[in-house]
Image (cartoon, rainbow, N blue to C red):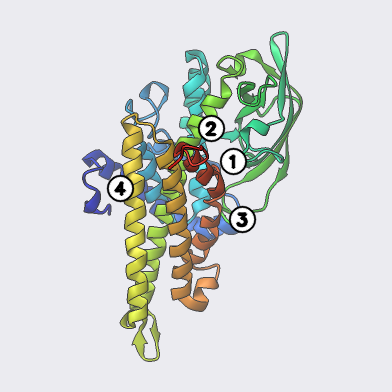
Amino acid sequence: MLDPFYDDFLKDEHRLFYETCLRFAREEIAPHAVEWEEAECFPRELYQKAAQAGILGASFPTAYGGATDEHDPFLAIITTEALLQGGSTGVVVGLGSLGIALPPIMFLGTEAQKQRFVPPVLAGEKIAALAVTEPGAGSDVAGIRTRAVRDGDDYILNGTKTFITSGVRADQITVLARTGDDPHGGLTFFVVEKDMPGYTVSRSLKKMGWRASDTAELSFDDVRVPAANRLGPEGSGFLAVMQNFQNERLGLAAYAVASAEIALAEAENWAREREAFGRRLMDFQVTRHKLARMATRVRAARTFTYQVARRMQQGHDAVEAVSECKNFACDVAQEVCYEAVQIFGGMGYMRETFVERLYRDVRLLPIGGGTSEIMNEIISRVRGYGRRDSR
């Protein structure tokens, strides 16, 4: 149930969609969450089931198989909040990889490219991944070395990408590559298809958390990519990836808030049921006050996230705010999940409990989509802290 406190942000259709996602989480994810976490994989068929439920295309235009023609970041946020109730962040992240893989196509692609690459993904027929990060270039996009060189009607692509969500099973990969020497102006997006000779999944990576989502290292060895798979003109990639980062950072803030809210609920329930020294944990003032602080922090993080989402929905510049929001929400998630494990005691350390999974899963949030340190640098630059006239 969505908190009425946020009625100013949410419409009736948001609440109906939340119920659809929540039902899917309870019926399709929850019964298998532990099994899929241990297997570090979930069935491909789940993509099609999510598509049939209207979940995959929720934030995309109807012309390409989506469900809305309005820019509505709350749909993606609500999807995260509901699906995480199924018990596996990894499953939600895996299903959601299209949320960062398709926007560069929507932003830069021709109509023919959009019709070719977007509908099959939204239908759950193909899996899409985004490949930006490299072994030597994570948050430093300007340091990307994967290179695409024009050769007639094709580009010859060489390089390595790593930490690619859904990369093991992806049918199409939106790849950022260097087509020029300018650190920012020399970047271009391409769509690489899995059957292209020279493209290989070199490693399936083992992770601390998000275990049910596959993560890969990808290799490109003289991959011949048709120029028809280039997105936008050469050099247009940097602006697109920066725009993509803003949406991804808002999405990670939503993951943080949803994880913290679930951890809080789990801790509250445990404190009401668990007894120590002949009393419920909830009967101890130290527990009640700890939960009160957790609840306050969760509400603050969620309100901040919703406010930034609204600003972005309205088309306002939110570079500083979304960076602040990501950092704050991630800090809250780590604190709340830590305290939830503490309240659970020894059981909080057991892999059979949801709070143990959440505790591991949230650790990635201050790293993914740009580290907390990078967020602080963005905030400091926007506020002019490095300038001599800074006050």
Residue lying furthest front in this view? Answer: 389
Q: Which residue is mark 1?
A: 166
Q: Residue at x 50, y 75 (%)?
A: 347
Mark 4: which secondary structure?
helix
Q: Earlier in the sequence, mark 4 or mark 3?
A: 4
What distance separates the C-alpha of mark 4 from that of mark 2? 26 Å
Q: Which mark is residue 39?
A: 3
Residue 11, image x and y in percent?
Answer: 23, 40
Kindly identify the amino acid type of the residue bearing the numbered disc 2: Ala
Q: Earlier in the sequence, mark 4 or mark 2?
A: 4
Tag 3, which secondary structure?
Answer: helix
Of marks 1 and 4, which one's residue comes earlier in the chain? 4
Asked whether the residues under the numbered discs 1 and 2 touch, taking CB atoms below 8 Å apart as contact, a structural biologist would say: yes
Asked if residue 117 is positioned above or below residue 282 in the image, the reply reads: above
Indicate whether 44 appears above or below 291.
above
In-front residue for pair 131/311 = 311
Mark closer to the observer (1, 3): 1
Dot 2 corresponds to which residue?
A: 101
Quick one: label 4, few (<14), some, or many (20+) residues within 10 Å?
A: some
Q: Which residue is mark 4?
A: 19
Instruction: Tell me residue 101's x, y (percent).
Output: 53, 32
